[in-house]
Image (cartoon, rainbow, N blue to C red):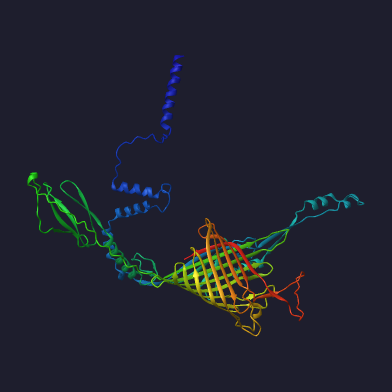
Amino acid sequence: MHKISMLIFGLMAILNTYAQSNSEIIPVAGDSIPSGPIIFSVPSATDYIQKLLDSDKLWRSDNEPMIRLLNRLLDHSHEPFDSVENRLVKFNPEEISINYHDRILYDTLPVRWLNDSTFIIDTTSFEKDPVTVNKTIQSYVIDISTIFFDDQLPDMRILIDSLLQAHDTIIEITIDTALLKTRNIKLYQFTNGQVHPSVTAPGSNRSAWLHTDSARLIFSETVKVLKANPDSPFNIVSDKRMPDSLQVAIGTLLLYTGHRDSTLLMFNDIYGHKTPFWVTSGKEELYRYWVKNYKNDSITIWVGNPARKEISFILEDDIDVNRITKEKIDDVPIISLEPDRTLAKIELLNEIPVYWDYELSNTFALNQTYLSNWARGGENSFSSMLDILGSARYVNKDDKTVWTNSGRLKFGTIITEEHGLRTNTDLLELNSQWNKVMKDKIDLSAVFYMKSQVARGYKYPNDSVVVSKFLNPATLTIGLGMEFKPFKNTSFNFSPISYKNTFVIDTANIDQTAHGIPENKQARQEMGAQLVFKNRLTLLKDLSISNAIRLFSNYLNKPQNIDVDWEINLDKKISWYFSVRLNLHMIYDDDIRFPVLDENKEPVYLPDGSIRKSPKMQFKEFLGLTLQFKF
């Protein structure tokens, strides 16, 4: 029993030793102990860096600056730049001969077969397959009534053969030629080893044939190329002057590299202190260095870099070495100085005046309405409005004069499903105002104002008759008076002497009576007074409101009936560029009259048979998202 136990124990020891010799050693992370300093030879360091560069998992991206620096280090270690420069300088373009040779170019395109003889060049994908395959299986039907109700029994062998016979399958291939035509894809026929029509252009030196697997179309073309001699490092060149251009480019880069190349030198003193000095392609400046001896005496030396790989040393003139000595305090003279306590005279700088300042503001507004299966009705619409305001302001503080000029273009359109594109806003304004400061907040003022439009206007739904266009009508106002500015961004301009002219040039095509001008006349002239009020307030954060009210009264005709032109803009800023704008514009002109309608929306006639007309309030509103830029 004891011998058996010893035998089993020996066998287990042998098996354990064998298992340990054949098992793999698995390293555990963080359980390695450094065996000594890391030492590389030049070849081993080169191989190690190259392996790191070839590792894809090591780098975060291919554009890491460390990769470029390591590649340049490897290039420089393989061969010094001086050797590369010497070999490039020896490059002689005259040793290269360039001549014309024939070269065959091959190209391959995939082919898709639509049937046994028709194919297309498959270079694009289809949303819908142009080929439709229909399979029809013909089966044989047996009338059972003839089997059981016939006078005689059928031949079972014939019956079984008819049931077991093979079914016929009819395959019908349909090619959607209309789809291929819309995609400008041609159909090609392959018959008798020829492709019809030809896949190459007429007169072309290209040839084409099908590959042996019939899945590709191979093109070949013979072209003339410039080829260098076999002894040169070049094969096919772009032109015969390429070697000369390369020699000039090499010389340019070598000259540039020589100017940029620099070498760092370290100057050491007796105490081991190091001072850096860069040697470049040459500088005119001299740099001062202090050279000391063991007694700490210093002498100035000027070091220069007159040319590439050259250093110059210049000793300071009039060298005087002074050493520090100990003296008694009684023998040291003490000199006290009284400082100058007078203040220097201050001379004021002459201010350079800036007379003109400019401003340009662009506002683009959008508004959209979309309806889908809306039970209450409605119509899809999309509207936009462009508002451009530019100003030029002249200020002369010495003369106390201010000249303000501004122009405004406001144009808007609307698109609906029923009526298409229409113009809903068209305004062109020109303003010029000259002010002379009389007293605080009160100026003598002269104003000029003109209003018209730029596009043709129609009285919808009738879009065949033009009711307005550029300068038809146009309103011109000139006034002289005073301006009062009680607060910032608030002004009252009153012109008791004002002249207003409303005119229509093209009375043959434009009805001037619709704009308050009598028949058989092209203009309506008025003398009266004008009051213009302008104000801009910030109600809340990023919420502002601007008012512009223009009132005019005619001295000679119903002065109590005042013309009103009032525009309000309410802006709520929602981001740096975007804001929500509400624009309200109201006009009342006693000379512009509209037909009076009854309860049935029919015109009311006067006893003489003419339509009764009266002035009415004109109102326009726009609300939308605006994109605003200021310069």
Side of 423 where 230 appears, left or right: left
Q: Is residue 221 visible?
A: yes
Side of 278 where 313 appears, left or right: left
Side of 455 where 51 appears, left or right: left
Q: Which residue sits at x=20%, y=62%?
A: 306
Residue with the most extreme bottom position: 520
List x then y, in percent, for residue 165: 77, 53
| Front-lying residue, 34 or 419 | 419
List x then y, in percent, for residue 250: 31, 65
Vertical order, 308 against 553 (above or below) = above
Q: Hey, which quadrant is residue 417 in on the image?
A: bottom right
Residue with the most extreme right position: 151
List x then y, in percent, for residue 38: 30, 41
Q: Is residue 462 visible?
A: no
Side of 467 where 304 appears, left or right: left
Q: Hey, which quadrant is residue 252 in on the image?
A: bottom left
- Count of all numbered marks drawn on residues in the image: 0
Vertical order, 518 against 9 (above or below) = below
Residue with the most extreme top position: 1
List x then y, in percent, for residue 600: 77, 70
Q: Hey, which quadrant is residue 170 in on the image?
A: bottom right
